[in-house]
Image (cartoon, helix red, strand yellow):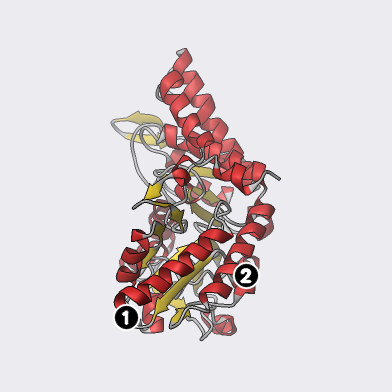
Amino acid sequence: MRSIEAIRADFPILQREINGAPLVYLDNAATSQKPLAVLRAMDDYYRLHNANVHRGVHTLSEEATALYEGARGRIARFINAPSSKQIIFTRNATEAVNLVAYSWGMATLKPGDEVLITQMEHHANVVPWQLITQRTGATLRYVPLDAQGTLRLDLLDTLLTERTKLFAFVAMSNVLGAINPTAELVARAHSVGALALVDGAQSVPHLPVDVQQLNCDFLVFSGHKMCGPTGSGVLYGRRDLLEAMPPFMGGGDMIREVRLEGSRWNTLPWKFEAGTPAIAEIIGLGAAVDYLADLGMDWVAQREHELVRAATERLSRVEGLRILGPGIEQRGGVVAFTLGEIHPHDIAAILDADGVAIRAGHHCAQPIHDFYGIPASARASFAFYNTFEEIDRLVLALDKVHAVLGM
């Protein structure tokens, strides 16, 4: 394994200084930084191969198509999808959830049906189901949290019934860091005849994910949280489901034939990819997947577990600091916290003055904060390129918050 110093050298932005101090980037749950391999892959496309995909017979178009579809194949292998045709490119995980909601949901759900989600969901896995159940007359139900910030799995026997058509849940919470028993939850959904959609936005970048082992029906994730560019996302779906689902959007590339009397759709995966895609971004995501695969996702998970263990231990010694969520054995690389009565925005601003970047707010997960009776939290989130010295910098900066605000 390469040294952390060598790995950090792959990320140009980590060499920056903010307000005269070396950058400590602890906002990885919002977006990760990008290695040179990704930047070069995108630059190479624009410099040498820039053309539209699928539509041309000239050399540049064929090269661009090979790069674009090559990325699809590598992403399929990264999550062990049975076929690259089950990899649908979207702009992000949010669009991927909406694709399932509007395509499968609008075609399937009816009054009397139920969709089950959880209280720890990102808004991207809440709002689409609120909209779709309102439109179809179906009912939306929620798995609540317990005092430790984990799901009330003891209530699943009551919440999962023959009326449940879909159980959509996050594999790892972007606020609580809670890692859910994904395979078990998928099996519980299937036991009542429901489908299972897994929000992997926080799990795919940080943990080994095997869709065949999980046996999930849908998996969504975003490229920008896994060292890839913004504007790139993925929907994995079971092939029979994708084949049966109507298109999400209409236009170029998702058609086989268009006549004034009607149209016929393209085959998978292109049926769901209308218009010119984010070609450079998908090529960049392919490079990001290669980068992570070279590191090894088992190593990534272990490295981040060590970081978050150190962070929770050191942060627990900060006066007045309260960590939200479960213990270390159920936690991924996310630590959201409050600091007495100090507003999280004030915490983040003072930390930024020392070059420490964290997130402050409700993190697109207001129901979690309602559960804790707080409007917002501060959040430090880790990636494999972070260091234990950066955790010390975070703790020192939090001590400064006390000194500055006198609380």
Question: Residue 217 vs residue 348: left or right?
Answer: right
330 is higher (above) or lower (below) than 28: below
Q: Percent x, y for residue 111?
A: 38, 72
Instruction: Looking at the picture, tell me which residue is in the foreground, 128 or 247.
Output: 128
Tell me, yes or no, whether the two marked residues, 1 and 2, touch with CB atoms within 8 Å.
Answer: no
Residue at mark 1: 406
229 is higher (above) or lower (below) than 407: above
Instruction: Looking at the picture, tell me which residue is in the foreground, 203 or 326.
Output: 326
57 is higher (above) or lower (below) than 180: above
Residue at the farthest right position: 1
Q: Residue 250's image quarter?
A: top left
Q: Percent x, y for residue 125?
A: 42, 64
44 is higher (above) or lower (below) than 242: above
Asked whether the viewer can see residue 309, the reply is yes
Q: Can you say which quadrant of the picture contains the N terminus? A: top right
Spatial distance from mark 1 to mark 2, Cα to Cα? Answer: 42 Å
Asked whether the viewer can see residue 89, the reply is no
For label 1, the SS is loop
Q: Percent x, y for residue 380?
A: 46, 65
Kind of residue indicated by mark 2: Pro
On residue 181, the disc is 2
Kind of residue indicated by mark 1: Gly
